[in-house]
Image (cartoon, rainbow, N blue to C red):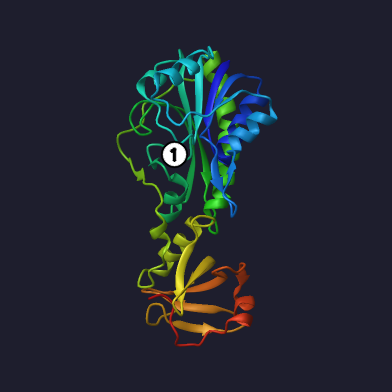
Amino acid sequence: MRLVFAGTPAFAAASLRAVVEAGHDVALVLTRPDRPAGRGMKLMSSEVKQAAQQHGLPVFQPPTLKDPGVQQQIHAAGAGAMVVAAYGLILPRPVLDMFSIGCINVHASLLPRWRGAAPIQRALLAGDSETGISIMRMEEGLDTGPVYLMQRVPIAANETAGSLHDKLAAQGARSIAEALIGIATGSIAAHCQPEDGVTYAAKIMKEEAALAWPADAVELERRIRAFNPFPGASTTLHGEPLKIWRASACADSGEPGCILRADAEQILIACGRGALRLEELQRAGGKRMSGAEFLNGAPLAVGGRLGG
């Protein structure tokens, strides 16, 4: 199949590699424009651009797809379908209608659950026991299109957004390769999503990462996992920011935010219900450390508090 591929981050790069390795003719790769990143704020290419260059594929980086000239350049690729994975730009109606087979999306949830921008984090925040990959034909609505294929992925008890991302990226790559074969041969058809069970995965905002200690310890532990590696769950210690990268909920009680225990065995913080055992922490400008390592450089007093 002759394809256009549209995607930007590592999640999408895995699918691009799978499409190329499956033997499809990728006529054009669309990805977001290079952006400044790192301490030096140098322009950085997206993971999809890097993967495309490794395979010698032409890359196009328009800031929008609404420009008729941009649409003409995409049309000139002569592709029968566009594969889209975490692209980051809205596909206007002329682009959706441009391909005889359509635009096929690799989405990181079991639709219609978690339509939208942050399905991985929202599944973790909600305490879902499983998620997965949906291969769907795109419409103008937000992830509302009919689904060709779904593959389930269990969520482990200690799953972080980072580890779940990697699982889903690998499954997404396998699923799009399988789906394209079925679409090309006519052996699979797209089925409308059910009307029941629709949920929306709103974009993650940095302020969501602040830990509110009056909350349930189980909820806070999910929040820590959902925001690892970005943006990182946070609190304050003596007015200074403190990141919490790993923690586990346990049965204990006290005033929310109060330090119940701080020794070589554990750092225990009271929550609105239960307590959190802090297992990996990071002071501003410092490195990630285990609880014991952290206490070596910054002793905590039992009865002290985290947060405002």
- Above or below, 269 against 77 in this view is below
- Residue pictured at 51% horizontal, 87% vertical: 301
Q: Position of residue 260 (x, y in %)?
A: 47, 84
Quadrant of the image occupied by residue 50: top right
* Secondary structure category for the residue under label 1: loop
Q: Position of residue 294 (x, y in %)?
A: 60, 76
Q: Nearer the viewer, residue 29 or 165?
A: 29
User: Hey, which residue is sitting farthest left in the picture?
Assistant: 195
Q: Quadrant of the N terminus?
A: top right
Quadrant of the image occupied by residue 256: bottom left
Where is mark 1, residue-wise?
Answer: 110
- Above or below, 277 against 192 in this view is below
Q: Nearer the viewer, residue 268 or 240?
A: 240
Q: Quadrant of the C terminus?
A: bottom left
- Residue pictured at 41% horizontal, 37% vertical: 111
Q: Nearer the viewer, residue 150 or 288?
A: 288
Quadrant of the image occupied by residue 257: bottom left
**Image mark count:** 1
Q: Position of residue 100 (x, y in %)?
A: 45, 12
Kind of residue sitting beneath label 1 = Leu
Q: Relative to 14, is 228 on the left or the right?
A: left
- Above or below, 263 against 138 in this view is below
Q: Position of residue 268 (x, y in %)?
A: 50, 78
Q: How busy is the neighbourhood of tag 1: few (under 14 within 10 Å), some, or many (20 plus)? A: many
